[in-house]
Amino acid sequence: MLEFRILEYGSCDYHAMVDLRSEVLRKPLGLSFTEEQLQQEMNDVLIGAFITTAHTAIAGCCILTPVNENIVQLRQMAVSPDMQGKGIGRDIVSFAEQYAHENGFNVLTLHARKVATGFYQKLGYETCGEEFIEVGIPHYEMRKNLK
């Protein structure tokens, strides 16, 4: 069963989230997080999805960073490699959209890796603008109205 939690910055669950993001998003690109990058997450909404079976383990995560009073950015979306393809990513995005909407945001924006644009398009996101390079790989800005 999947359980969603808003994580406290610096908690054990937060560190599990950082480890997952590092494994899925950073290490394959030869990158790692700096302390400065992690400290910038202190005021973000940190979302963890946990599988609760014999023991609880993080299955996926994302971060919501307010851009302004109407727009929030979904960042650092990651699903554990052994859990991919089971709908967990879709469920995380759905939870994040609901949370954002309930907290007064009308638009969710994100920087999607080019290889992930099809995933987000299936969830109703539209590409805005031209391809750009972020962390050394192609990305697109994508948006969805939450109204």
Image (spheres, grey):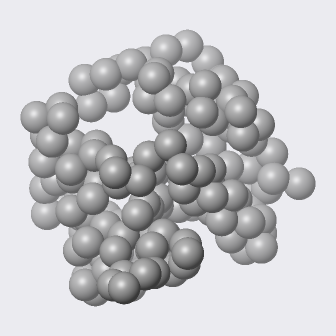
Kindly indicate the quadrant of the structure image that contains residue 25. top left
Whether residue 35 is visible:
yes
Examine the rendered structure and indicate whether residue 12 appears above or below residue 141.
Answer: below
Quarter of the figure with residue 134: top left
Instruction: Looking at the picture, tell me which residue is in the foreground, 51 or 75.
Output: 51
Residue drawn at (49%, 15%) of the image: 131
Residue 85: percent from left, percent from top:
50, 43
* Residue extending furthest toward the top: 130
- On the rendered structure, is 90 left or right of 51? right
* Residue 72 appears anywhere in the view: no
Give me the residue at 67% from left, 49% from top.
Answer: 108
View extreme (right): residue = 147
Q: Position of residue 4 (x, y in %)?
A: 55, 76
**Residue 23 rendering spot, x and y as whole percentages:** 21, 50
Q: Is residue 91 above or below residue 53?
A: above
- Image quarter where the N terminus lies is bottom right
Quarter of the image with the C terminus is bottom right
129 versus 62 height, above or below: above
Task: Identify the residue at image location x=21%, y=62%.
Answer: 19
Tell me how many marks there are: 0
Indicate left or right for 105 with 12 as reference: right
Residue 129, compared with residue 144, is above or below; it is: above
